[in-house]
Image (cartoon, helix red, strand yellow):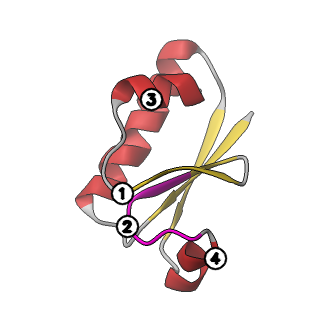
Amino acid sequence: MKHFKVLGSGCKNCDNTAALIEQAAKAAGVDVEVEKVTDMGAIMGYGVMSTPGVVLDEKLVHAGGVPAPEKVQEWV
């Protein structure tokens, strides 16, 4: 199982990013866990200055804006 964290304030872009990850995983038949992180201290701990950010298995893979669906498919 892959563990994703969506870093951000809980805005619409953050929700869209989480939904993209869940949709891509479902289409690929991959089990994922998507956690939304809204604590600014935790977000800054990953070095993210622009949200939403995406962390995959504790590695930052994206920051700033909704990721492209093709990129999300690569992650899952």
Q: Between marks 3 and 2, how big is the CA–CA gap?
A: 18 Å
Q: As drawn, which residue projects farthest toward the bottom?
A: 41
Q: Range of the magenta residues?
A: 47-54
Measured in 3D between alpha carbons, the distance from the residue under mark 2 to the one under mark 1, in whole angstroms, is 5 Å
Residue 71 x, y percent position in the rendering: 44, 29
Q: Residue 45: which disc?
A: 4
Residue 10 left/right relative to 59: left
Q: Which residue is mark 1?
A: 64
Residue found farthest to the left: 12
Q: Which mark is residue 20?
A: none
Residue nearer the viewer, 4 or 46 = 46
Mark 3 lies on residue: 71
Mark 2: amino acid: Ser
Is 75 placed left or right of 38 in the picture? right
Q: Position of residue 21 (x, y in %)?
A: 47, 36
* Marked residue nearer the N-terminal end (3 or 2): 2
Q: Residues within 10 Å of mark 2 (few under 14, many from 20)?
A: some
User: SS for tag 4?
Assistant: helix
Q: Which residue is mark 2?
A: 50
Q: Residues within 10 Å of mark 3 (few under 14, many from 20)?
A: few
Spatial CA span between label 2 and label 4: 13 Å
Q: Tell whether label 1 touches label 2 (CB within 8 Å).
A: yes
From the viewer's perspective, is residue 66 above or below residue 20? below
Who comes first in sequence, dot 4 or dot 1?
A: 4
Judged by its main secondary structure, the magenta piece is loop
Q: Position of residue 65 (x, y in %)?
A: 31, 53
Residue drawn at the location 63% of the way across and 35% of the way down: 32
Q: CA distance from mark 4 to mark 1?
A: 15 Å
Residue type for callout 4: Gly
Q: Is residue 8 above or below residue 42?
A: above
